[in-house]
């Protein structure tokens, strides 16, 4: 299907004024809609479909792609898919891309393949760079807070990763507010300001607002990127009439069928009529709600088809 050299759309930045927003008080502009590679880009997924989604994203100004060491399945294979995409298509456009990866969840066996030690984070990032065929990532995250490793060890590792040139910026994901406060201060004092926080935020899960994470980020000039903004597909029309065979709920253990409750279906009906009044899809309505929240920089969407991504990107039309 894609035998020729990829030639991205010359129009890809034509909607710049609507799409890009400053990430906290940094020099970085991020697209309001970013693309996540957690699902649909693994070794189990058709490469040409992953490639078409990635092309569509870049062709429409989505410059930020988000990874973690363990994305797949198999763990690591989403980064490998991207390494292949770099070779096939994206090498000439490396400087137009903002690539993030993370470490913090289980990646390999034994005591050094998990959590927040220097040993794990350093070796994991080296592995990620090899898989992605990159010399550096733009952003490296601690993927979760480790209550047993001294927090200074994790944070100093983030500092050193930047000083070694393996990442340009650092981020924190899923940390509670108190250690986040400590991280913000520590990183600032070590001249590697915290660029961004990545947390789960959607119309069905507002805990990060209630916990004060968004206000903290806004007050401190830290960007905020919302993951699972569509609650893995629940906040779309995907499950209104049943559970499609090709859906995440049918295929993955991350989204179980007990989430499709009568209450959810009622809520979706309400959202559907609100969305219709705005001439939007449920997905666009759900994304717009997040983008209106104080402190939010970007929504990090997943997509299993070009059509879904196209629909989601319309939120910034
Ligand atoms: N930091 C963390 O701990 C963490 C955790 C989770 C995610 N993330 C990041 O956030 C990214 C997004 O997470 P997510 O995949 O859960 O996001 P999501 O956008 O909430 O869900 C994506 C899924 O929703 C469905 N979908 C998307 N657009 C649709 C549309 N317009 N109409 C109908 N269905 C639609 C698709 O499901 P089907 O596959 O069923 O078609 C798609 O795979 C990840 O890739 C990752 O980068 C980070």
Image (spheres, grey):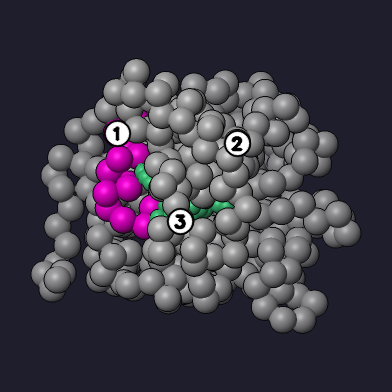
- Asked which quadrant contains residue 46, the reply is bottom left
Q: Which residue is mark 2?
A: 263
| Spot occupied by residue 197 in the image (x, y as percentages of width and height) | 62, 40
Alpha-carbon span between mark 2 and mark 1: 27 Å
Label 3 CA crowd tier, 10 Å (few <14, some 14–19, many 20+): some
Disc 2 CB within 8 Å of nearest ligand 1 atom: no
Which is nearer the N-term, disc 2 or disc 1?
2
Q: CA distance from mark 2 to mark 3?
A: 16 Å
Q: Is residue 175 shown left or right of residue 241?
A: right
* Residue identifier under label 3: 243
In magenta, the rendered stretch is 300-316
Q: Is residue 303 above or below residue 220?
A: below
Q: Helix, strand, or loop for circle 1?
A: helix
Magenta stretch containing residue 54, yes or no? no
Do the residues bearing badges 2 and 3 touch, measured as CB atoms within 8 Å?
Answer: no
Question: Which disc is residue 314 wearing?
Answer: 1
- The residue shown at (76%, 61%) is 116
Measured from the top left, where is residue 68 in percent x and y?
55, 61
Q: CA distance from mark 3 to mark 1?
A: 25 Å
């Amino acid at each position: 299907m894609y035998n020729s050299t990829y030639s991205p759309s010359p129009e890809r930045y034509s909607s710049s004024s609507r799409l890009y927003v400053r990430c906290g008080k940094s020099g970085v502009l991020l697209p309001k809609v970013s693309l996540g590679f957690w699902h649909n880009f693994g070794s189990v997924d058709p490469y040409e479909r992953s490639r078409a989604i990635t092309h569509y994203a870049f062709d429409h100004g989505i410059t930020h792609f988000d990874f973690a060491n363990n994305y797949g399945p198999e763990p690591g294979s989403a980064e490998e898919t991207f390494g292949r995409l770099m070779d096939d298509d994206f090498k000439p456009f490396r400087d137009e891309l903002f690539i993030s990866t993370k470490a913090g969840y289980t990646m390999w066996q034994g005591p050094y393949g998990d959590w927040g030690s220097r040993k794990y984070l350093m070796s994991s990032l080296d592995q990620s760079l090899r898989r992605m065929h990159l010399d550096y990532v733009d952003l490296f995250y601690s993927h979760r807070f480790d209550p047993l490793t001294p927090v200074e060890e994790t944070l100093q590792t983030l500092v050193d990763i930047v000083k070694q040139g393996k990442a340009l910026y650092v981020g924190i994901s899923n940390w509670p507010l108190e250690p986040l406060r400590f991280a913000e201060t520590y990183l600032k004092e070590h001249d590697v300001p915290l660029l961004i926080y990545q947390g789960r935020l959607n119309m069905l899960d507002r805990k990060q607002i209630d916990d004060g994470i968004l206000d903290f980020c806004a007050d401190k000039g830290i960007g905020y990127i919302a993951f699972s903004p569509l609650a893995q597909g629940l906040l779309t029309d995907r499950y209104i009439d049943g559970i499609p065979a090709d859906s995440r709920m049918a295929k993955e253990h991350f989204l179980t069928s007990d989430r499709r409750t009568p209450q959810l279906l009622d809520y979706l009906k309400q959202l559907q009529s609100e969305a219709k009044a705005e001439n939007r899809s449920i997905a666009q309505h759900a994304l717009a709600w997040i983008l209106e929240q104080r402190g939010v920089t970007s929504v990090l969407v997943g997509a299993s088809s070009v059509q879904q991504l196209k629909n989601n990107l319309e939120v910034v039309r």
